Image (spheres, rainbow, N blue to C red):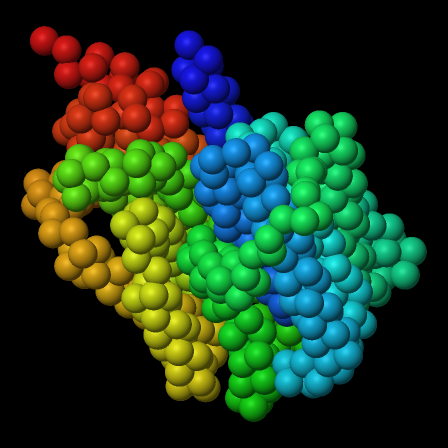
């Protein structure tokens, strides 16, 4: 009975952590819209140039390392006696902490001391102060990762979930309020960008304070025996590094692509003859696609990843054969919602661009840009599934190859097509990654991911959505000409609602997913009931 209660509590905590991660990602995508409205395209360019440098290390440590530490601590809890368990936990936490201290200080030194060099490589020396300000965030990572990992190893997900939400809320509040004050009283775009980067450091610090306070109250720090035999350092460091990278690598891909854009696009646009101001604004308009992609991936990825833990559990039984149905559902859910978000955004992009960002500049580029949602959704799920099979090296190699393709694509295509070339380069790299991960999964675990009828039904649902959106837009555009932001909001918002309704109705009517499959997806219960109602006899 106790074991059942423990598992129930663990699953409740895991669900809370998933919901909090969803809230954090949505906040992280949405705040960019009012921020862009405050600082304009040039100000948005400034922030997006620096953002990936700070976020890559944070994503790796705060997310990847926390999971890796929790895994090692959970393994330590299987030892025979309490004293052995406590000693092992203490050694792991100590090694992990000091390893992260070395990494954090190295990264801080690189970003702070090398800010001028990095800014010069990006073609904009004024970015150096922002880089130095943002570099302080990495100093929070050792404590944050170790404490989060300890909570997760014990199944205490609630403190981590609450800290994540508070941390992001503080960050977003400071970014928006601080940028508003800077723009009102000084009008400095680089000053607003510096406030935005400082907000990340403040948010992380608040998260650390919350977690450490709860950690002390719960007295989770292990008690060690000073005479106990010490464990080897290198095996723990090696496992922490490899496992943390494998856990976070799908998230690091998008940030890595953004970093390539930071180094290449602005410089190449200047070489193409654009003025500094126009090049910055063009890069800022191109970056409008980032929050749209993030939001699309959140919707698609969260639905699919909710059942990935089931895949990992089933993979341990009967050579993974029990996992087949879950793998198939994960893939079909990722493609279904990834494609719906991506194609839906393409259909309404002229209105969404004006509604969110005031102008319809580079709408065609943004339409190409948001196609990233499909391969990113697939990559997110496939890397998690392959991790469940214990496959880490080949997926990492595939991701690195995609990174190289993106770099080559930017260097060759941006000189020819400006930012449209960068959008194409991202899609080439990401679709390559998704395709190769799919092939590798089938080699590791031969399986038919979806029948031909699935793709046919998906095509028909997309066709119905396109007809509905275009018909509605055509009719309402006659009444409301696309001349003001309010009218774009009315047309775009209503078109999104109608398109989503038609697409989901078609999906339910054609039973793209089975009734019982909907119940396995978060918030899928209502879709299951709707599908049953539509197909009642």
Residue 340 coordinates in the image, percent (x, y): 32, 43
**Could you tell me which residue is drawn at 28 percent across and 34 percent down?**
503
Is 391 displayed left or right of 168 in the figure? left
Foreground pick, 217 / 190: 217
Is 489 displayed left or right of 135 in the figure? left
Q: Residue furthest right?
A: 185
Judge whether 269 appears above or below 223 on screen: below
Is 196 displayed left or right of 334 in the figure? right
Residue 36 coordinates in the image, percent (x, y): 66, 55
Residue 505 occupies which quadrant of the picture? top left
Q: How many numbered discs sit on the rendered protein?
A: 0
Foreground pick, 180 / 114: 114
Foreground pick, 519 / 511: 519
Quick one: quadrant of the N terminus?
top left
Residue 420 coordinates in the image, percent (x, y): 43, 72
**Could you tell me which residue is drawn at 77 percent across and 79 percent down?**
113
Judge whether 182 appears above or below 309 on screen: below
**Could you tell me which residue is drawn at 54 percent across and 81 percent down?**
264
Quick one: quadrant of the C terminus?
top left
Residue 25 coordinates in the image, percent (x, y): 55, 43
Residue 257 seen by the camera: yes
Is 245 displayed left or right of 506 in the figure? right
Residue 429 seen by the camera: no
**Could you tell me which residue is drawn at 33 percent across and 19 percent down?**
525
Judge whether 324 appears above or below 415 on screen: above
């Amino acid at each position: 009975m106790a074991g059942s209660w423990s598992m129930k509590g663990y699953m409740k905590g895991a669900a809370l952590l998933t919901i909090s991660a969803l809230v954090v990602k949505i906040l992280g995508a949405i705040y960019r819209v009012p921020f862009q409205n405050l600082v304009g395209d040039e100000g948005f360019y400034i922030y997006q140039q620096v953002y990936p440098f700070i976020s890559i290390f944070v994503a790796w440590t705060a997310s990847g390392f926390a999971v890796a530490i929790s895994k090692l601590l959970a393994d330590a809890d299987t030892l025979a006696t309490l004293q052995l368990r406590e000693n092992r936990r203490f050694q792991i936490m100590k090694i992990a902490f000091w390893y992260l201290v070395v990494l954090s200080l190295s990264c801080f030194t690189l970003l702070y001391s090398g800010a001028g060099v990095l800014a010069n490589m990006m073609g904009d020396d004024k970015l150096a102060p922002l880089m130095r300000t943002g570099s302080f965030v990495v100093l929070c990572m050792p404590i944050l990762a170790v404490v989060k990992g300890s909570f997760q190893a014990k199944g205490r997900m609630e403190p981590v979930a609450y800290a994540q939400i508070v941390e992001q809320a503080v960050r977003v509040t400071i970014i928006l309020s601080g940028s508003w004050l800077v723009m009102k009283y000084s009008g400095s775009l680089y000053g607003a960008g510096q406030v935005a980067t400082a907000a990340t450091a403040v948010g992380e610090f608040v998260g650390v304070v919350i977690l450490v306070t709860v950690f002390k109250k719960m007295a989770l720090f292990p008690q060690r025996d000073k005479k106990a035999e010490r464990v080897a350092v290198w095996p723990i460091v090696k496992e922490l590094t490899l496992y943390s990278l494998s856990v976070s690598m799908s998230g690091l891909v998008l940030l890595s692509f953004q970093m390539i854009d930071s180094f290449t696009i602005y410089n190449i646009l200047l070489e193409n003859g654009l003025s500094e101001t126009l090049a910055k604004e063009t890069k800022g308009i191109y970056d409008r696609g980032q929050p749209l992609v993030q939001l699309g991936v959140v919707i698609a990825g969260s639905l699919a990843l909710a059942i990935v833990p089931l895949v990992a559990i089933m993979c341990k039984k009967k050579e993974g054969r029990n996992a087949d149905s879950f793998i198939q559902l994960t893939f079909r859910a990722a493609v279904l919602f990834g494609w719906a978000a991506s194609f839906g955004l393409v259909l309404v992009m002229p209105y969404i661009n004006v509604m969110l960002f005031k102008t319809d500049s580079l709408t065609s580029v943004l339409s190409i840009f948001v196609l990233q949602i499909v391969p990113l959704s697939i990559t997110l799920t496939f890397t998690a599934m392959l991790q469940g099979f214990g496959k880490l090296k080949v997926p990492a190699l595939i991701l690195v190859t995609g990174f190289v393709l993106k770099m080559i694509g930017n260097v060759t295509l941006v000189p020819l097509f400006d930012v449209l070339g960068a959008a194409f380069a991202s899609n080439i790299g990401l679709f390559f990654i998704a395709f190769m991960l799919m092939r590798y999964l089938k080699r590791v675990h031969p399986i038919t991911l979806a029948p031909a009828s699935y793709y046919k039904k998906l095509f028909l649902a997309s066709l119905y959505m396109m007809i509905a959106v275009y018909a509605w837009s055509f009719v309402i555009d006659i009444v409301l000409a696309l001349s003001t932001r309010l009218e774009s909001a009315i047309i775009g918002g209503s078109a999104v609602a109608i398109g989503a309704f038609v697409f989901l109705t078609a999906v339910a009517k054609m039973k793209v997913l089975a009734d019982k499959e909907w119940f396995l997806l978060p918030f899928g219960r209502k879709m299951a009931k709707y599908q049953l109602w539509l197909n009642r006899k």
